[in-house]
Amino acid sequence: MRFSFFILVITFLATGFKCFSQKKDGELIPLLKQSYKIDSLLITIVDDDSAFMKKYPCLIIDVVNQGNALTLNIGSYNKRVANEIIAKNHSMNTHIGYFEFKGFKAFVFSAKRFENLFLETKNTKRIDFLDFSAAEGLKIDDILNVPYLALFMYQNGKFSIPEPMH
């Protein structure tokens, strides 16, 4: 009886230790180097002193390739919503990268590469609040209906605000 109890305790400790040791804090994201054009653009829309930006510290930049132009949808979100958006895009094999801007965590994703606005580096950063498994119950409509702060077109080396669709 003692021997069985001893084996049970050893098995429990070994299994518990294995599960505990596999726990990770966050996900690794490739670091990006943003171009001066992105810095100039973000300076025009990011107010680092605003209460809104402090409440929503994660910038999300969705880069959409449209023929010879790019559309940049830029939003500011809390960590929970940012995690869900990033996790869903990760599950769809989207290119994801990260950089910091004025103390904000900026995440960039694109179905294709980041063109010349962002340079992918060989470095990564572990983001403590990210969990890619958060995408499991999320539908694509959940991330398509997220509002953005700003929308810009990038074409021929210049940013512009797109014309409203009629």
Image (cartoon, grey):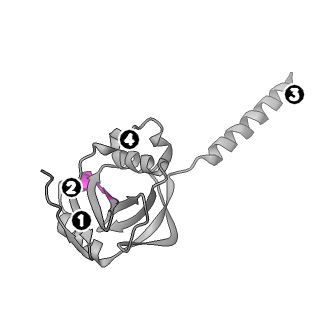
Return the mark for residue 149: 2
Q: In which image quadrant can residue 104 be found?
A: bottom left
The reply, left or right, for residue 28 in relation to residue 8 is left
Q: Is residue 76 above or below residue 159?
A: above
- Region rendered in magenta: 54-62
Spot occupied by residue 158 in the image (x, y as percentages of width and height): 23, 75
Give the spatial CA distance, label 4 vs label 3: 54 Å
The reply, left or right, for residue 96 in relation to residue 70 is right
Spot occupied by residue 58 in the image (x, y as percentages of width and height): 32, 56
**Residue at point 42%, 57% (across, down):** 111
Sequence-wise, which precedes: disc 4 or disc 3?
Answer: 3
> Are discs 4 and 3 less than 8 Å apart at CB?
no
Which of the two marks, 4 or 2, is nearer to us in this view? 4
Sequence-wise, which precedes: disc 2 or disc 3?
Answer: 3
- Residue 47 appears anywhere in the view: no
The reply, left or right, for residue 149 in relation to residue 100 is left
Residue receiving disc 3: 3
Q: Looking at the picture, which amino acid does disc 3 mark?
A: Phe
- Disc 3 secondary structure class: helix
Which of the two marks, 4 or 3, is nearer to us in this view? 4
Residue receiving disc 1: 153
